[in-house]
Amino acid sequence: MELHLATFVVLDLETTGGSAESAEITEIGAVKISGGEIIGEFQTLINPQTPIPAFISLLTGITDPMVATAPSISEVLPTFFEFCGSESSTFLVAHNAPFDISFLKAAAEKSGRSWPKYKTLDTAKIARRVLTKDEVPNNKLSTLAPYFGAISEPNHRALADAKATVDVFHGLIDRLGSFGVKTIEDLIDFSHRLTPAQQSKRHLLEGLPKEAGVYIFRDSKDQALYIGTSKNIAQRVRNYFSSSEARKRVLEMIAIAERIEAISTPTVIEAEILELRLIHQLKPRYNRRSKFPEKKVWLKLTREQFSRLSIVRGFDSLDDRYGWAGPFSGIEEAQSAKEAIYEVEKIRQCTVKITTKSMALSSPCALYEMKRCDAPCIGAQSADSYLSIRDTVHELLHGASTLLENQLIAKMNQLAQDQRFEEALILRNRLGAFARGVGRGQHIRSLARVKELIVKIADEIVLIRYGKLAGSERFDAGENIERIIENLLSTGEIVNNDQSILPSGNYEESEKLIRSINHSSELLYIDESDGPWQMSIASAAAIRHRLLDNLSDRFGQSERVDRMSNNPFRT
């Protein structure tokens, strides 16, 4: 059928949430088109029979009073299906169609109606295939509508968004001629088409395990192209060879891939850690994150008599004796954290190397006149006096930051009272950058000091030694959990404490482990013979206490519980 002869119903929904399983439809808007002309419109509010969340009302303007007298979805569906017409002659169109269609299918099921088998088209998917990044930065409706000169502006109301989608759809159809799309069949094939590489290389899926682990796409020289992880390797990799995969980099990667290596792991957490390690080691060209941890930015005290704050790249340059914080998101955030410390401490900001000879030849900078530095560069401040400042900054970097926070908050409040809001905002940003960097450093440092830790995360038992994953096992209901613990302790990887910041493993691994512990876990065993587990920020302390509470339920008043409970937790 020629495109100009086909009938399309372009639709949009407003809902109370993002999932058809837990949210309801609040509005339907639809426009029927054929031959480039609008031949009908449909719009109605719908009573979701549940309160509309405040943020949804703020986004859409649809409130509970507005839908109080509106019909229910079961009353609306027959009329809507009648408006759409026959499933054999009508094609549904929506922007991000799977979202809208999932809600309509769920509504039909709840109403006891069968869903007509309409063929659907997704303007977002078509746009991804037709438009380049040079033309539009993304494929959101709010971006595509002005690009195609849509008359209606998307505003999170169903009919307005449906009208905007009509103009986007017409704009895309105009572009499709150069792709040889002339009929509705061509359009459906184009929308769901697999690339030649996706079609010809589906044999690479053969033999992949349906279990947790890591998968590695490799090229003809057996170089790693991309490394990923999943709780079901076969299912995840299959998605790369489906029509839902439209990322250009991934399609390019599939075109040069020659085999897929799978490494099964006993648990999902072990797969995630292995993925981090392999990306760090192999640096595959199509992975964007975790490839270059050595480029991450940190803030540290320099190793000299009159230490100063320095922004550096690379974890290996850090030393606990001189204090450090991070990683930071970039140099700008690290600089903000450094400025926060300058606000409260008179640590020198110059970069010269201070010696007896340099003191005789130097002159003080403006900071000395402003009383923000005591000028150790000219010998005006003794080494012992400066050491006190250095020790204070060391403590700040390692988390003893209450004084800094109180002083900066007091300054912010005063600036706000004086209506100097831009200056107050600068202080707030500095404090936020400082807190983020120091907090991340505390987590890394704290976990790296624990000799042995065993936690239960969902249905997985995990052994951590000095911040490194040393072993894991899956736990099924009814199993002897103490047997698993003893097995992990005896067979887990041996990790030696060489007194470095992270004796083994990298900082990303430690951060991943601590996030997993924080999310949902039970502490089963801990060896604190090297000292108690210390995490000085409140959220970390809450993790510690919550984990300890699970011990009595699991082991009763065993010696292991007594030993842990008697250890003071210093904050």
Image (tube, rainbow, N blue to C red):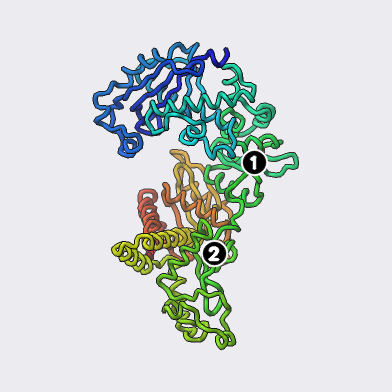
The residue under label 1 is which amino acid type?
A: Ile
Residue drawn at the location 62% of the way across and 23% of the way down = 177
Does residue 99 appear to the left or right of 258 in the view shown?
left
The percent position of residue 292, horizontal first and vertical second, equals 61, 54
- Image quarter hosting the N terminus: top right
The percent position of residue 79, horizontal first and vertical second, equals 35, 14
Characterize the local packing of mark 2: few (<14), some (14-19) or many (20 or more) Cα atoms within 10 angstroms.
Answer: many
Residue 330 disc label: none
The residue under label 2 is which amino acid type?
A: Ile
Total marks in image:
2
Residue drawn at the location 49% of the way across and 50% of the way down = 485
Residue 501 disc label: 2
Q: Is residue 230 visible?
A: yes
- Of marks 1 and 2, which one's residue comes earlier in the chain? 1
Quarter of the image for residue 435 reads: bottom left
Label 1 belongs to which residue?
216
Per the image, label 2 sits on a secondary structure element best described as loop
* Viewer-nearest residue: 349 or 320: 349
Per the image, label 1 sits on a secondary structure element best described as strand
